[in-house]
Image (spheres, rainbow, N blue to C red):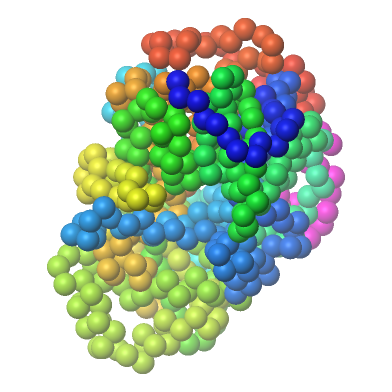
Amino acid sequence: MAQYLPAGNDEGMRYDVVVIGSGFGGSVAALRLVEKGYSVLVLEAGRRFADDELPATSWRLRRFLWAPRLRCFGIQRIDVLRPASRRAAGDKVLVLSGAGVGGGSLVYANTLYEPLPDFYTDPQWQGIADWQAELAPHYDQAKRMLGVATYPLTTAADRAMRAVADRMGAGSTFHPTPVGIHFGRPGETVDDPYFGGAGPARTGCLHCGACMTGCRHGAKNSLVKNYLWLAERLGAEVRPLTTVTGVGPLSSGYAVSTVRTGGRRRSVVEADQVVFAAGALGTVRLLFSSSRALPGLSSRLGALVRTNSESILGATVPGRSKVDYSAGAAITSSFHPDARTHIEPVRYGRGSNSMGLLQSALVDGGPHRVRRLLATLARQPLTYLRTLSVRDWSRRTVIALVMQSVDNSLTLAWRRGRLVSTPGHGAPNPTWVPAGNTAARLLAEEIGGVAGGSLSEAFDIPITAHILGGAAIGASPSSGVIDPYQRVYGHAGLHVVDGAAVPANLGVNPSLTITALAERALSFWPNKGSADPRPSLGAPYAAVPRVWPSRPAVPPTAPGALR
């Protein structure tokens, strides 16, 4: 194995495990490993936020947007996956993700669904195990840790979306959303209700719609309120504003090279084992950039990148709206117009109007899409001028998030120091979803508004808030980057536990599945100093028993206890 020779190593910086990223996978890893006696360091590129430091609205750009070169260290990251060639412009994707200590949980919509049936039987991993049975106890554990509850109110957006479901013949599928929010009495702070007193005090939800700009009120069950909170109190160290630039082998263990986010100060940390949990794009990018130091990575690195077949649409009332559609949690209900499609009403809180800049008039896919967009705008210029204005946008808009469990993908490659995309396995990555466009038009009729789409989709550039895959689970190195225990093929001591590991489109918001997969993978790790029950790396998959931690963080009678 090639030796990775760091320069300027920080003397004495050695841990049992370094976890790269503090989102859903990284936070699970931090807690479950420190419970098993390992010394754990979590490296996070973003900053740490107290509740009152989160942006009051999306216009607080330095706290909302992630753009370190512009000194913006916010919670909303926006990336563009560019195609490998100009002729493949259809492979562009606009990707929304999270940043900061707590990762995507700071900016996500609290929505915690189990996936549609196609996920468990996807050909990528179907033959390995009965995944629905394998994951069932870990979904249960994840739900209790994340405090999942059914949204208790019916908002104006829900009533409109229910009417759309009825008109599409899918009214029976309409239901309230399972969300990670503490409800209780609005604004009332109570002692920890989830972890038997081991967690922080919590405050009842105000239904203000500000979940995706970061809850400033203590109601959102973000990872800093559960997994990370418990992990740090057991001794895990979290180091914010630290960007990992490379991972390579030492004679024993690994060297993790870092740079101060937005700065130049470099350092190297040593670890026996490394867990990649930097988000799908972050993990794939880091594995590619480290590939010279890590020879023998699977050729499937970058394959099976999924967008969840997503489309972000909606409807907006021109001018002033008599109804406040920003009231409620970020997502409060959903329905299924067909077996593979899932549609949810989404909202930002009052005053958070900057994301309205991504809105456009709605046009179907197909030839001459931009030309048809311009013709649509020209037919009713004043109406669209009022509709596309961002003034009071969140109050008068119902966003429609459309997701599908269709088997399609992109493949990422590493060219000149950056990720580029090419067509992947399965059907082409969709640039529009017909059922979603139908729903958006019906939604506009219901609220007396105008149907809208994403500006990027008008140029056949899909937008997704749920990028997945790229280092997927597979039965062997010829089919996947990691094994069914989420260990990196060819490199003992390396692991992937974030969205990069997800092998198939889910058709629902992915946070619960990333958490459950991580819970399962970490449940097989031995306690420090004990024998490893897992087969050797590269051996055929075999079912192994869970290993219970030697020092659990949560009392056994608490709702969040390990079971």
Question: Residue 426 placed where, x, y %?
Answer: 22, 40
* Between 400 and 303, the one nearer to me in the picture: 303
Horizontal side, residue 270 vs residue 456: left or right: right
Q: Quadrant of residue 310?
A: bottom left
Q: Position of residue 416 (x, y in %)?
A: 35, 50
Q: Is residue 464 visible?
A: yes
Q: Is residue 268 left or right of residue 508?
A: right
Task: Give x and y (percent) for residue 524.
Answer: 57, 17
Please tell me which residue is depicted at 36% across the width and 75% down the height of the picture.
360
Tell me the residue at 70%/44% (across/down): 239
At 45% from the left and 75% from the top, the residue drawn is 357
Q: Quadrant of residue 477?
A: top left
Residue 494 visible? The answer is no
- Can you name the residue that lies furthest to the bottom here? 382
Q: x and y percent of residue 95 in the render?
A: 42, 56
Above or below for 522 versus 191: above
Would you identify the image quadrant in which residue 475 lies?
Answer: top left
> Observer-nearest residue: 202 or 293?
293
Identity of the residue drawn at 44% across and 58% down: 79
Above or below, 70 relative to 273: below
Q: Is residue 185 magenta?
A: yes
Counting labels gives 0
Vertically, is 411 above or below 165? above
Q: Nearer the viewer, residue 293 or 556?
A: 293
**Main secondary structure along the magenta-highlighted residues:** loop
Asked if the magenta segment contains residue 187, the reply would be: yes
Quadrant into which the C terminus falls: top right
**Quadrant showing the N terminus:** top left
Magenta range is 180-197
